Image (cartoon, coloured by chain):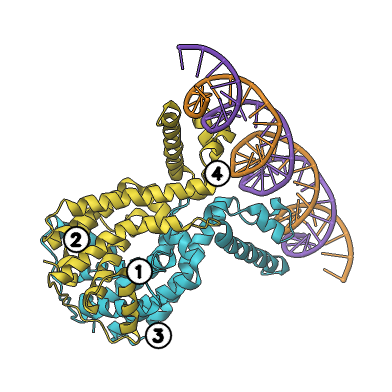
Chain colours: A cyan, B yellow, C orange, D purple
Amino acid sequence: MTGKRAVVRTETTAAIIRHARRQLETRGAANISLREIARDLDMASSAIYRYFESRDQLLTVLIIDAYSRLGAAIEDADTACDRDDLIGRWTAIALAFRDWALTNQADYGLVFGTPVPGYEAPEDTNAAGMRYTNVVVQLVADATARGCTSAIEPPKTKGLVSEYRNVKKAIGVNAPDATLLAGLSAWAAVFGAINLEIFGHVDIVYTDPGVHFAALVDMLGRQVVGLT
Amino acid sequence: MTGKRAVVRTETTAAIIRHARRQLETRGAANISLREIARDLDMASSAIYRYFESRDQLLTVLIIDAYSRLGAAIEDADTACDRDDLIGRWTAIALAFRDWALTNQADYGLVFGTPVPGYEAPEDTNAAGMRYTNVVVQLVADATARGCTSAIEPPKTKGLVSEYRNVKKAIGVNAPDATLLAGLSAWAAVFGAINLEIFGHVDIVYTDPGVHFAALVDMLGRQVVGLT
DNA sequence: TGTACATCAGTGAACGCGCGTTCACTGATGTAC
DNA sequence: TGTACATCAGTGAACGCGCGTTCACTGATGTAC
């Protein structure tokens, strides 16, 4: 067991994934070419099928891989902070998200961009996507437990109370509606800002998008979510 | 002039675009097929070249088309409101954006999703993209002129003052930094929330995403940007 | 330690398909006199 | 109003390319006795 054959197998599998990820940038997720990967690896195109049963399955592995690297990055950023330093954790998480997105643009596009037409993501990908989400959810839970309160007041939108009851059940956190709305807004803003930056919609506006982003994150954490 | 030939020409051009847009959904922007369009239109594939000089140029037209339909939708929403009803205008704009995105998912993906690899967007597309942006920018300008002030306070992030000076120059609006940061956050949150919804990242969380979205927009407008 | 057999990575040819783009051409529509 | 010519939409064949996937096969690595 873990003999020579197994070692080579993991190496080759990794090499295929590496080349596939490279192709994300040049060809796009919808056009990853098994034949080109095989060519780059100096093997027959049919040999790929000893490692992945189809192109779609390779895509699935790429997605799960991307999610779990993102998850690890966000977890690491969070774990490096003092548990009680809520604003520090929030900032670290948001900055780590942006960093990851900027240094892994192709992966970011794969998981957060336009869905690949014709590709049906299997269950496993959703599970992998929960990992980074859970870090944020946990932060909201900790903030609530430590008595942080948001200054914002949820509007009396029709059906909001029952909607948020469901949300709390879905994410498994029992926070006040104000905190929930504030947290969801803050996260949407962080995500939106990163998305706009990565996909090139703000090139003309910012000189250094990072400066604005840092201010945005700080403001959201302190003044919207009410972290300390 | 505007003879029979010209009429037929515009009709055929429109038909090509219509079929191309349909293909956005099924094939994705990167894989729009001129041959399939020609087949659907019962013409030789080479005939397409009497209307568009290349596949990329067709893509460009699609992008500009999408931007200008989005721009029109947002302008209409804004124009239907009393000029002094700032919160009403903000709400109308944000809801119109979401509506447009939901009913034109393929177009939304085309302009706001993963960039098409290998496609270099020409200048014209940027200009078309300014149309909806300008509506929001104008709202911020009006809010400033009418004395609306944001309750938030920009953090003392290094370089923020000079960065925002550039931003104000770029968008042509002279608003206080607080308003600018609040407005940019609010817009990022709206955009982020729509993006997450359209690309299917929140299916498990919300029962009715529209209820949360309405609350989000109202809260952002009143309590973050400080509109009245 | 050596032998017999099973496993499995990798091959190369083939199937059947699709694509964007060019080119010389036909024939109908439009224009100028 | 009619004729001669120019314009231009549309054709069909061709070029040169790429793709995912299957299949019968070889030969090296691993395993059981």
Give the camera-side residue of A56 and B5: B5
Q: Is residue C20 above or below residue C17?
A: below
Q: Secondary structure at mark 3?
A: loop
First reached walking from the N terminus: tag 3 or tag 1: 3
- Amino acid residing under circle 4: Glu
The residues bearing labels 4 and 1 have C-alpha atoms spaced at a distance of 36 Å
Q: CA distance from mark 2 to mark 4?
A: 40 Å
Mark 4 sits on what residue? B53
Q: Are marks 3 and 1 on the same chain?
A: yes
The 10 Å Cα crowd at callout 1, few under 14, some 14 to 19, many 20 or more, is: many
Tell me, yes or no, if residue A172 can be seen here.
no
Asked if badges 4 and 1 are on one and the same chain, I answer no
Instruction: Say if mark 3 contacts mark 2, CB within 8 Å.
Output: no
Q: Position of residue A173 (x, y in %)?
A: 24, 68
Q: Residues within 10 Å of mark 4 (few under 14, many from 20)?
A: few
Please indicate, yes or no, whether residue A137 appears anywhere in the rendered image: yes
Q: Which residue is mark 2?
A: B90
Q: Amino acid at mark 2?
A: Trp
Q: Residue at x 16, y 62 (%)?
A: B218
Q: Callout 2: residue from which chain?
A: B
Do badges 3 and 2 share one subunit? no
Tell me which amino acid carries mark 3: Ala
**Residue where numbered disc 3 is placed:** A80
The residue carrying mark 1 is A193
Residue at mark 3: chain: A
Answer yes or no: are tags 3 and 4 on the same subunit: no
Chain designation of label 4 = B
State the SS at label 2: helix
Q: Quadrant of the C terminus of chain B?
A: bottom left
Identify the amino acid type marked 1: Ala
